[in-house]
Amino acid sequence: MKIDFLYLNEKDMIEAGVLDAAKCVETMRETISLFGKKDFLLGGPKGDEHGLQVNFPATSDIEGFPLDDGPDRRFMAMPAYLGGKYHMAGQKFYGSNNHNLQLGLPRSILMVTLADVDTGAPVAQMSANLLSAMRTGAMSAMAADYLARKDSKVISLIGPGVINKCAFMCFMEVFPALEVVKLKGSTPNSKSALAMKTFIEKEYPQIKEVIICATLEEACRDADIVSEAMSVTKENMEEFKMDWFKKGAAVFSMGSFYVKDYDRFLDTTMVVDNYGMYDKYMRNFIARGATDEFGKKREWCIMGMHFIHLVNSQKTERKNVINLADIVNGISQGRTSDDEVVMCSIGGMPLEDISWGYECYQEARKKGIGTMLNLWDEPYMK
């Protein structure tokens, strides 16, 4: 049996609408709804794992062995199946190395494969840097539709890189009346912050003011919506203080959210995209021990893990950590008052890559975009 599949490079993906923010937000709404209805499969024995990660050692006696010599140094494979109208299996795979930036490359280089559920044959192979960034940003914006105040005017983008650029595009679809954007980069003169400011002023002239903030506190204070998408080393992590967030704020964390006073989350509405995923993160964290190989204290910095810690330490009940899918499916309420502070952890799942990849694949087929590649006409061995 002949097997062909569609290859879509980054230019093809753009033509196929990978940057269509409004459509991506709605696709994420459908995706998380299916997740809540259990019409999916993820990896692991409980079917709720983010993926399988290859971690590099800090040192090695083997000459030329790859080392963990920078932030986000890893390989990651993220398989999944998503049901509903998608009924598609797939996987996102990427390698990540911060030294890529010195070569003029993104830190991570991502590909997504869509596969036939029954045969396992590839249906499409596509460039996924933009796909992954858009689905991540769209998840936060979609969640904000339920969790942020409808009269929100001020948004803070903490970590003004690609993820938050895509997130902002999606937030503007959900909250077109936003007026002020606060940016926090690694420094007040951050090139990424300056580039984001230029992008916003050019593409969104309705925004009245773009402010580059000198401190994390400045970025958080007075913001109605906070979108966090930082990628930093543990040594450079800044601590968030819960006092910085005003009444009614909605905070969406897609990266690092380092807090020491965990108990302050008890005064907020805690929401997660996948509780089981953060529970597995915490189990892995505990299994690795309290200190790293250099004897330094290890600390987690993912918002959802803070929630897990509060449940595990019996400071709150599991029911008090709300599933985003239950909100989307009308089982739980979203925001219930103008004053509540909402904390929402968006860890990302390959389900989102499959659904958004599927939508781009379907659009590419309609438009005749991409290159058909042949796996075989007949398999050499059966």
Image (cartoon, rainbow, N blue to C red):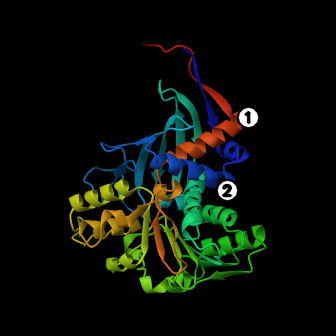
Q: Position of residue 51 (x, y in %)?
A: 39, 47
Task: Look at the picture and state if 166 lies above or below 53.
Answer: below
**Whether residue 110 is visible:** no
Instruction: Work out whether mark 2 precedes mark 1 in sequence or the reverse, and give the earlier one.
Output: 2
Residue with the mark numbered 2: 21
Instruction: Say if 197 sits above or below 324 in the image.
Output: below
Number of labelled discs? 2
Which residue corresponds to the image point at 46% horizontal and 41% vertical from the top-left? Answer: 39
The image quadrant where one finds the C terminus is top left
- Disc sitting over residue 25 in the figure: none
Residue 305 lies, in percent from the top left, at 34, 65
Q: Is residue 277 above or below residue 84?
A: below
**Would you say residue 73 is visible in this rendering?**
yes
Q: Which amino acid type is shown beneath numbered disc 1?
A: Lys
Crowd rating for badge 2 (residues with CA inside 10 Å; few <14, some 14–19, many 20+): many
Mark 2 and mark 1 residues within 8 Å of each other at the beta carbon: no
Callout 1: SS: helix
Q: Position of residue 112 (x, y in %)?
A: 53, 42
Q: Is residue 268 left or right of residue 7?
A: left
Disc 2 element: helix
Q: Amino acid at mark 2?
A: Ala
Q: Residue 279 appears in which quarter of the rendering?
A: bottom left
Classify mark 1: residues with Cα within 10 Å, few (<14), some (14-19) or many (20+).
few
- The reply, left or right, for residue 71 in relation to residue 61 is right
Q: For this rendering, which residue is in front, 266 or 304?
A: 266
Q: Position of residue 97 (x, y in %)?
A: 46, 57
Q: Which is more toward the observer, 382 or 22?
A: 22
Above-or-below relation of 94 to 164 = above
Residue with the mark numbered 1: 366
Compute the Cα span from label 2 to label 1: 19 Å
Q: Where, quadrant-wise, is the N terminus in this rendering?
A: top right
